[in-house]
């Protein structure tokens, strides 16, 4: 059906609904969908099957059916309901208790047919406003969906760029590691002759040091002997030893003959005295040949390693960049990554008391406007929409604990819009927050205006 024809038919229908209620053949208060159950001049069976009554007892202001279905147009049954036709707008049901109560509940005034209330049929005006609202929503949905296609395109390109950058970084790191390993092998090979030269130098030095030690031992032994040989006869007697109380082994102030026996020395005895600390000598510098081998082993290596930014291999910032790229690439940003643009972004809503801050895929927080610390209302958890609309709800949990209560959490409901903005926030339950968030990323492919209006044929 063309849009022009549809609008023409609608105009005719509206014109018919501008005056009094449209005359219908079915009993008052019965919807068109139930007309077949009310056949004139035939017994009526209650819709719950509880009983069957003559047709003339329909709307006789006496309740015969337990479900109230025999009094669709009166207030006789407390559990009954009245159907407002509302031509030009949307049909509706109201409780039967509101029939003829002096208040117009149906926009077509049909509920006040016998109350004397002065009502105006507002269905046409309400239908016009509804159509305008539907048209605006259709336009928003259309524009939002076009923006969503852009977001999907940009997300795809962004993901490809990030994957390329990550691959490049990982490849560079691997190449650097391989180069360093190759140079390390070269170093180890170059170190062999240098290592052997060092070992020869050390061995030679140990031998020289032993000779030096022995010479010093002999000198010290001779000096000690001369000090003990008081009469310089070439022998150290018991009496001479006893005159040196510093040799007393038990420090009792006397040196017995027995104690001196082990001390009896002759000029031909061997005396071992360990080197003192100040007697230690340092190893001499490497000889020219050895130093040349050492310099040759490292010069080529250092030159090549100088070309390799080794710090990059284990640099914390490099590792952080790689890990964040991996994390972002692996995130669930929707079926076509349409929500990727929200990553690393934050959106605020200011109320009379607080500033609410939503950072998608990160956290939700609340901060007093006039001073005070920020409160964590939840960390990113998961997509939590229904099965057929999973990406319509975000869940943030494990927020800051409430006093004697649970940890705070926030549910974020996403609706279609041309802009990305937090539109409202509330706390339906203690420590459980609700945010309304519009974004083009949630917009679905729109139906045509004709299809939208056809879905509301009562308009």
Image (spheres, grey):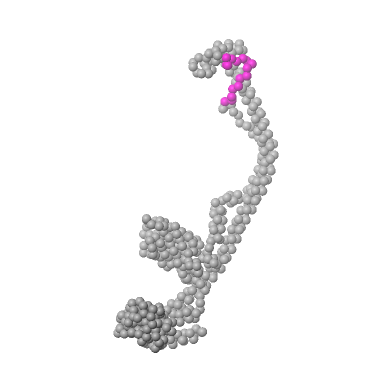
* 128 left or right, relative to 309: left
Q: Locate residue 384, reporting x and y percent.
A: 48, 64
Question: Is residue 375 depicted above or below 335 in this figure?
Answer: above
Q: Nearer the viewer, residue 112 or 201?
A: 112
Question: Is residue 34 depicted above or below 150 in this figure?
Answer: below
- Verify whether residue 40 appears in magenta: no
The residue at 67%/31% (across/down) is: 204
**How many labels were placed on the picture?**
0
- Verify whether residue 273 appears in magenta: yes
Q: Quadrant of the C terminus?
A: bottom left
**Residue segment shown in magenta:** 261-276
Q: Nearer the viewer, residue 28 or 267?
A: 28
Q: Locate residue 109, reporting x and y percent.
A: 35, 83
Most extreme residue toward the front is 51
Is residue 122 at least partly visible in the picture? Answer: no
The residue at 59%/18% (across/down) is: 223
**Occupied quadrant, residue 377:** bottom left
* 76 left or right, relative to 200: left
**Occupied quadrant, residue 354:** bottom left
**Occupied quadrant, residue 67:** bottom left
Is residue 397 at least partly visible in the picture? Answer: yes
The residue at 45%/80% (across/down) is: 456
The residue at 45%/82% (across/down) is: 457
Predominant secondary structure in magenta? loop
Q: Locate residue 327, reporting x and y percent.
A: 54, 58
Q: Locate residue 389, reporting x and y percent.
A: 49, 69
């Amino acid at each position: 059906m063309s849009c022009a024809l549809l609008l023409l038919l609608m105009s005719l229908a509206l014109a018919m609904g501008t005056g009094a209620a449209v005359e219908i053949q079915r009993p008052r208060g019965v919807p068109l969908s139930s007309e077949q159950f009310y056949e004139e001049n035939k017994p009526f069976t209650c819709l719950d099957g509880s009983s069957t009554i003559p047709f003339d007892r329909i709307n006789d202001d006496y309740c015969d059916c337990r479900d109230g279905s025999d009094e669709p147009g009166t207030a006789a049954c407390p559990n009954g309901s009245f159907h407002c036709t509302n031509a030009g707008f949307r049909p509706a049901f109201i409780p039967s208790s509101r029939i003829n109560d002096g208040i117009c509940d149906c926009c077509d005034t049909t509920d006040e047919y016998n109350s004397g209330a002065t009502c105006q049929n507002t269905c046409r005006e309400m239908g016009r406003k509804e159509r305008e609202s539907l048209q605006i929503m259709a336009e928003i949905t259309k524009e939002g969906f076009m923006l969503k296609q852009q977001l999907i395109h940009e997300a795809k390109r962004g993901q490809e760029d990030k994957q390329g950058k990550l691959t490049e970084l990982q490849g560079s790191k691997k190449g650097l590691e391989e180069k360093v390993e190759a140079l390390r092998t070269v170093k180890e090979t170059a170190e062999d002759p240098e290592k052997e030269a060092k070992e020869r130098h050390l061995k030679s030095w140990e031998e020289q040091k032993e000779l030096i030690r022995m010479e010093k031992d002999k000198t010290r032994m001779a000096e000690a002997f001369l000090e003990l040989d008081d009469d310089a006869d070439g022998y150290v007697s018991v009496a001479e030893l006893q005159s040196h109380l510093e040799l007393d082994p038990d420090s009792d102030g006397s040196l017995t003959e027995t104690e001196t026996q082990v001390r009896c020395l002759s000029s031909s005895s061997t005396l071992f005295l360990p080197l003192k600390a100040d007697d230690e000598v340092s190893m001499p510098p490497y000889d020219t040949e050895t130093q040349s081998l050492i310099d040759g082993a490292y010069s080529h290596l250092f030159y090549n390693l100088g070309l390799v930014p080794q710090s990059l291999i284990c640099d914390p910032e490099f590792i952080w960049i790689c890990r964040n790229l991996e994390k972002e690439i692996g995130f669930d940003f929707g079926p076509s990554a349409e929500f990727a643009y929200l990553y690393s972004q934050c959106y605020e809503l200011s109320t009379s008391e607080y500033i609410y801050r939503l950072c998608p895929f990160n956290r939700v927080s609340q901060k007093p406007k006039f001073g005070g610390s920020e409160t964590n209302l939840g960390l990113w958890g998961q997509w939590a929409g229904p099965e057929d609309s999973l990406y319509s709800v975000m869940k943030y949990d494990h927020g800051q604990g409430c006093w004697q209560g649970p940890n705070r959490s926030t549910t974020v409901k996403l609706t279609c819009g041309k802009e990305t903005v937090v539109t409202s926030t509330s706390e339906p339950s203690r420590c459980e927050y609700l945010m309304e968030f519009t974004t083009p990323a949630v917009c679905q492919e729109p139906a045509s205006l004709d299809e939208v209006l056809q879905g509301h044929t009562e308009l």
